[in-house]
Amino acid sequence: MSKAHLQSLEEALLRRGWRVLAVHPGDDYRISATWEIQRSSTQPSRFIDFDGLDDTRCLSLDESYGCNIRGQSAGDEAARLYFRRPNKNRALWDQDLAAFVVALEHVERESDP
């Protein structure tokens, strides 16, 4: 199920000028992988960590069930994206995805010199 989410996330980022610079390995515990993204070469990279914590192993990136913007507080719900089933409620998935991208842009604005 996550491949479609990853594709949707990457497409949403591309539409807003972000690009995935690299896919870094996770920590073999709770992070499946990390996307290093950047909008402009004059700005620092941002990182999106993908959830992989499972009962018996760390899930692969394709099996991840959500992601978060690294460095954002756990209470900032917009900085987290849960990979809900888009076919069940496409409008809610689209809304969550848009809020996540807006949160990412907010992080970028806060760090501008």
Image (cartoon, rainbow, N blue to C red):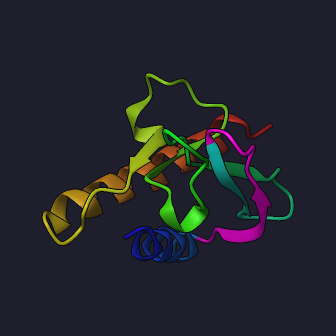
Residue 34 image position (x, y, % from top left): 70, 54
Stretch in magenta: 17-30
Residue 88 image position (x, y, % from top left): 13, 66
Instruction: Judge left or right: residue 87 versus residue 62.
Output: left
Instruction: Judge left or right: residue 76 versus residue 59.
Output: left
Residue 2 image position (x, y, % from top left): 43, 67
Front one among 92 and 58: 58
In the rendered image, which quarter is residue 10 located in?
A: bottom right
On-image quarter of the C terminus:
top right
Front one among 80 and 26: 26
Residue at image point 55% right, 24% down:
73
Residue at image point 50% right, 56% down:
64
Above or below 102: residue 23: below
The residue positioned farthest toward the right in the image shown: 42
Front one among 78 and 53: 53
In the rendered image, which quarter is residue 53 located in?
A: top right
Residue at image point 48% right, 77% down:
7
Residue at image point 60% right, 61% down:
60
Residue 6 image position (x, y, % from top left): 50, 70
Q: Is residue 27 magenta?
A: yes
Instruction: Judge left or right: residue 1 versus residue 59.
Output: left
Front one among 89 and 98: 89
